[in-house]
Amino acid sequence: NAGVTQTPKFQVLKTGQSMTLQCAQDMNHNSMYWYRQDPGMGLRLIYYSASEGTTDKGEVPNGYNVSRLNKREFSLRLESAAPSQTSVYFCASSEALSRGYEQYFGPGTRLTVT
Amino acid sequence: AQTVTQSQPEMSVQEAETVTLSCTYDTSESDYYLFWYKQPPSRQMILVIRQEAYKQQNATENRFSVNFQKAAKSFSLKISDSQLGDAAMYFCAYPTSGTYKYIFGTGTRLKVLA
C-alpha cells in the first residue's frame, strides 16, 4: 500500500516551458487535492477534485490546469512556467470531501523555474 | 473569512520536556474540525491529531494532546516527553464549510535539543 505517490520528486524548468506533475493514490479515495507550499505561507490549495469527473478551483489556480484522469490519478499541468511558480507541490487525497476526513499527502515535488 | 494563525515561527524544547505550539483561528461556524499536521525534513505531511468542535473533551494521541478553547478560538498542541523525532514543522489546519477547503497556518518549526 503506497498511499499517495508523486512524480517527479524534483524538476527544473526554464521560463515558458510546460510540464505535468503526476499524482496517484491507492486508497480508493474519492477526493484529491493539489497544494503549493512556499516559505512562510503554509500550504495553499491550487485545485481539488471532489470525485472522479469533477474539478474545482482552489485559492491560487492561475497558471495551472488539472485533470482527474480516473479515481486514482490527478495531474497538475503548468502550461507556461513562470519563476513565481517555483515552489514545493503536494498532492493529497481523502476518503470524501468532508471536513472530518484526514487528508493523506504525497512526498511532494520541488519545482524550480529559472 | 476564515483564517488560521500560528504566531510562533520557531520553538525549541529540550529532549524529554514539554512544549506547547499555539494556533488561533477565526470562524463564525459552530460545528467544525481542527487538525494538527507534522512535516518532518522528509517533507511528508502526517496527521498528528484531530479535534471536533462539538466535543468538549480535548483530543489526545499518546504524547500529543490539544488544548481546545472554543470561545477563545484557540487550538494549541502540547507535546509531552519531547523526542528528537518530533523535530519538524507543525501546521494547524481548518477545513472550511461548503467547499471543504483546508486553510493552513504558516507553520511552527520545532527544534528538539539533545
Image (tube, rainbow, N blue to C red):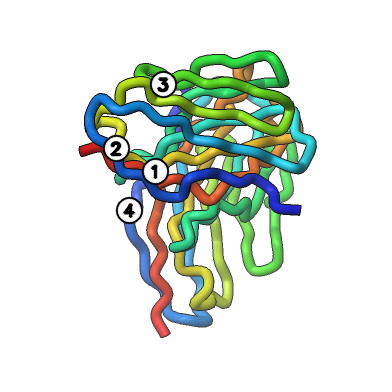
Q: Chain of mark 1?
A: A
Q: Which mark is residue A88?
A: 1
| Residue B61 image point, x, y percent | 70, 61
Residue nearest the viewer, comparing B28 with A23: A23
Task: Tell me the residue that label 2 is attached to.
Answer: A13
Q: Going 62% across and 63% down the picture, which residue do you hit?
A: B64
| Residue A3 image point, x, y percent | 69, 48
| Residue B113 image point, x, y percent | 39, 80
Task: Tell me the residue that label 4 is attached to.
Answer: B9
Task: Tell me the residue that label 3 is attached to.
Answer: A64
Q: Tell me the distance, in whole angstroms, between the alpha carbons under discs 3 and 4.
A: 29 Å
Q: Residues within 10 Å of mark 4 (few under 14, many from 20)?
A: some
- Check disc 1 and report its element: helix, strand or loop: strand
- Check disc 2 and report its element: helix, strand or loop: strand
- Check disc 3 and report its element: helix, strand or loop: strand
Tell me: residue A73, above or below residue B8.
above
Q: Going 71% across and 24% down the picture, which residue do you hit?
A: A70
First in sequence: mark 1 or mark 3? 3
Q: Chain of mark 2?
A: A
Q: Tell me the distance, in whole angstroms, between the alpha carbons under discs 1 and 3.
A: 14 Å
> Can the viewer see residue B1 in this picture?
no
Kind of residue at badge 4: Pro
Q: Residues within 10 Å of mark 3 (few under 14, many from 20)?
A: some
* Badge 4 and badge 1 both on one subunit: no
- Of circles 4 and 2, the one toward us is 2
* Badge 3 and badge 4 both on one subunit: no
- Quadrant showing the N terminus of chain B: top left
Q: Residues within 10 Å of mark 1 (few under 14, many from 20)?
A: many
Q: Tell me the distance, in whole angstroms, between the alpha carbons under discs 4 and 1.
A: 19 Å
